[in-house]
Image: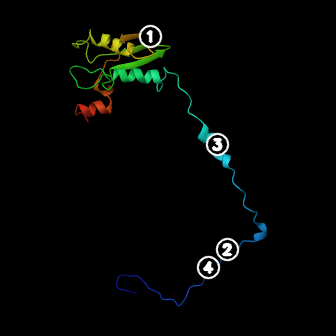
């Protein structure tokens, strides 16, 4: 026994473990893999989204237009601020439900009109309607992480 309590045993040799045996009579010849195993997967295209669904072209164009509108007091766009509660697109008719940071907001009269003008200018939008709602009231929890980072809240 050594000083640290480990027992060392020396051996002359170690027996080899038995090898596995394969009887060649039981092995079938390898099959050739056909090349069509990925045909359906690789050729399939993602389903086309309707333009008014989230991810659709018209919907995303409306979101991009909303991201160009900034709150004059806060250097963040109204979409990232969480002022947009909903966007509904129905065959060129777009309805945006939104709120403001407070009912006494200095742009309470002009902001909904600007949203209506910007959304109405998106190609494919025939009629743009803005519904200003106060329930639920806006709070900073509705802001995106990007907006919180911009304002130093993260």
Q: Secondary structure at mark 3?
A: helix
What's the distance in space between the residues labelled 3 and 1, CA to CA?
41 Å
What's the distance in space between the residues labelled 3 and 2, CA to CA?
39 Å
Mark closer to the chain start, 4 or 3: 4
Q: Secondary structure at mark 2?
A: loop
How many neighbours does mark 3 have within 10 angstroms: few (below 14), some (14-19), or many (20 or more)?
A: few
Mark closer to the chain start, 3 or 2: 2
Q: Residue furthest right?
A: 25
What's the distance in space between the residues labelled 1 and 4, CA to CA?
80 Å
Eye-nearest disc, 4 or 2: 2
Q: Secondary structure at mark 1?
A: loop
Residue 86: x %, y % from top left: 41, 19
Numbered circle sitting on residue 39: 3
Location of mark 4 (residue)? 17
On the picture, is 105 further left or further right than 61?
A: left
> Which residue sits at x=53%, y=91%?
12
Mark closer to the chain start, 1 or 2: 2
Q: Are marks 1 and 4 in contact (CB under 8 Å)?
A: no
Q: Quadrant of the N terminus?
A: bottom left
How many neighbours does mark 4 have within 10 angstroms: few (below 14), some (14-19), or many (20 or more)?
A: few
Residue 48: x %, y % from top left: 55, 27
> Which sits in the foreground, 149 or 122?
122
What's the distance in space between the residues labelled 1 and 2, CA to CA?
76 Å
Question: Dividing the picture into quarters, in which one does residue 5 lie?
Answer: bottom left
Location of mark 2 (residue)? 20
Location of mark 1 (residue)? 126
Q: Are marks 1 and 2 in contact (CB under 8 Å)?
A: no
> Which residue sits at x=25%, y=20%?
71
Residue 64: x %, y % from top left: 37, 24
> Which residue sits at x=79%, y=69%?
25
Eye-nearest disc, 4 or 3: 3
Residue 121: x %, y % from top left: 38, 14
């Amino acid at each position: 026994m050594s000083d640290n309590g480990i027992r060392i045993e020396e051996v002359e040799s170690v027996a080899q473990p038995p090898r596995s045996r394969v009887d060649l009579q039981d092995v079938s010849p390898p099959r050739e893999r056909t090349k069509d195993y990925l045909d359906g997967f690789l050729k399939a295209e993602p389903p086309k989204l309707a333009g008014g669904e989230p991810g659709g072209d018209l919907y995303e164009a409306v979101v991009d237009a909303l991201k160009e509108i900034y709150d004059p007091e806060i250097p963040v766009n109204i979409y990232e601020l969480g002022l947009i509660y909903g966007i509904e697109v129905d065959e060129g008719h777009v309805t945006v439900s939104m709120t403001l940071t407070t009912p006494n907001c200095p742009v309470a009269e002009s902001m909904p009109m600007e949203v209506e003008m910007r959304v109405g200018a998106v190609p494919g939008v025939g009629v743009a309607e803005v519904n200003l709602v106060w329930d639920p009231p806006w709070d900073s929890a509705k802001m995106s992480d990007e907006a919180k980072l911009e304002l130093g809240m993260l």
